[in-house]
Image (cartoon, grey):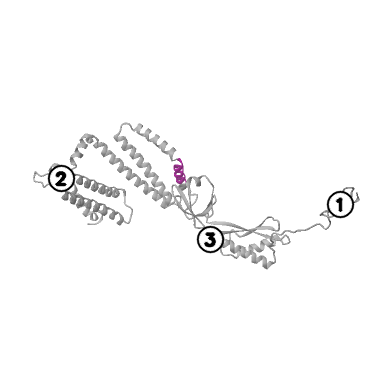
Amino acid sequence: MTGLGAFLAPTTEMAAVMPALVTDALLVNDTIRPGNGRVALGPLERAVASVGVAVVVIAVRYLVRRYRRAQTGDLGTTKRLALSSVIAASTAAGVLTVVGLWGLGDQLVAAYGSLALAEQVPNIVLAVIVLGGAYALTDFLGQIIHEVVSTGKTISTHQKQIIYRLTQLGVYSLAGLIVIGLFTDNLGSLLVGAGFLGIVVGMAARQTLGSVLAGIVLMFSRPFEIGDWIEFEENEGTVTEITIFHTRIQTFDGEYVTIPNDRIANNPIIDRSRKGRLRIEVEVGIDYDDDPDHAAEVAQEAMAGIDNVRTAPRPKVVAKRFGDSAVVLGARFWIDQPSARKRWRTQTAVISAIHGAFREEGITIPFPQRTHGARSEGLSVTVGSGSDVTGANGGGRNGDAGAGGDE
């Protein structure tokens, strides 16, 4: 035997015994009580039998899951439904068997009669069909989503998972409403009550729900990816985690910052590595006596010899402004696959290269200077009768003293 049948042969044999066990177990009066040629079971025998049933159920689940893992390709909808049915049937049979072993069949029969479950059998069958159809539909839609993602690059793997989970939620929600409608005649009132409950919960947890909705939007819009170098408000670092509630970044100091998604959705974000390249500018000042054009050429040649600096777009130097002590030039260059480490390493190399090139060409990089001076002549002050007293300090006092002496 090969294939599914051969692999599940022990499971089939164990499952074949289940109906007889269930039938005998549910006949409580004949099974666990003496009479009719049957032997009554004591507590120890019941416990041992219950353990045996549990072992059989666990073995069935193990074999089914082992078969799933052994398949190299993707299982089809039919096989998935068959395997799930085997697990569900074996579990249900095991539960009923244990119920019968411990003498709980009478209570179940009484509950069955009081609830008039016999009249609900068609609805139960329809509910099982609806739920099975929902499972098959989500599996089918999952295959379509997988094929779309595999054939194109418009949707990432992460977005595929989000789409698939939302599809599952929608299909199962619809199936749940259908099943509820099978067992109640007042579905409208139930939905109204659920709506009011949703409003109350939404008002109580609006910030959390806002973060959840913002997380869903971020997962679809993808303004940044895990591993991107971003700047948000006063935080700058590498994105390490994106969840439906928050985004976490690692700063260059080794700190982890957790930011709620609603804040990210409502504030600007700078992504320095999104396009795979980044322009960096270094400012340098030259003396007013030097030629700005010549200094720009020297700086461009110095930057062109650095490894991490891109040749296209080529490095460029522009005159930016007149400073207090220098003409300020902006040395601009591009790097590939930007990261904080590469930026600082390349920027350091550019500064060192420009400094060395300016020194060789005799171009002065000035530093702020302040000149202090004084007037050569003193301050002329007129006192009293119009006589002039020359001197910045004490002129008025001397004049007054002289006038007083004359009196």
Q: Position of residue 171 (x, y in %)?
A: 36, 42
Mark 1, other Cα within 10 Å: few <14 / some 14–19 / many ≥20: few
Q: Nearer the viewer, residue 270 or 127?
A: 270
Please say if 88 is above or below 292: above
In reply to whether residue 125 is colored magenta, the answer given is no
Image position of 366 (left or right of 206): right
Q: Residue at x 28, y 55 (%)?
A: 66
Distance, label 3 to label 1, CA atoms, is 75 Å
Q: Which mark is residue 341?
A: 3
Amino acid type, residue under disc 3 in the picture: Arg
Sequence-wise, the earlier of marks 3 and 1 is 3
**Residue 382 in view, yes or no:** yes
Q: Nearer the viewer, residue 15 or 241?
A: 241
Magenta residues span: 206-217
Sequence-wise, the earlier of marks 1 and 2 is 2
Distance, label 1 to label 2, CA atoms, is 135 Å
Q: Residue at x 82, y 54 (%)?
A: 394
The secondary structure making up most of the magenta span is: helix
In reply to whether residue 211 is colored magenta, the answer given is yes
Residue matched to label 2: 24
Q: Position of residue 350 (x, y in %)?
A: 60, 63
Task: State the residue lying farthest toward the right.
Answer: 406
Please say if 36 is above or below 229: above
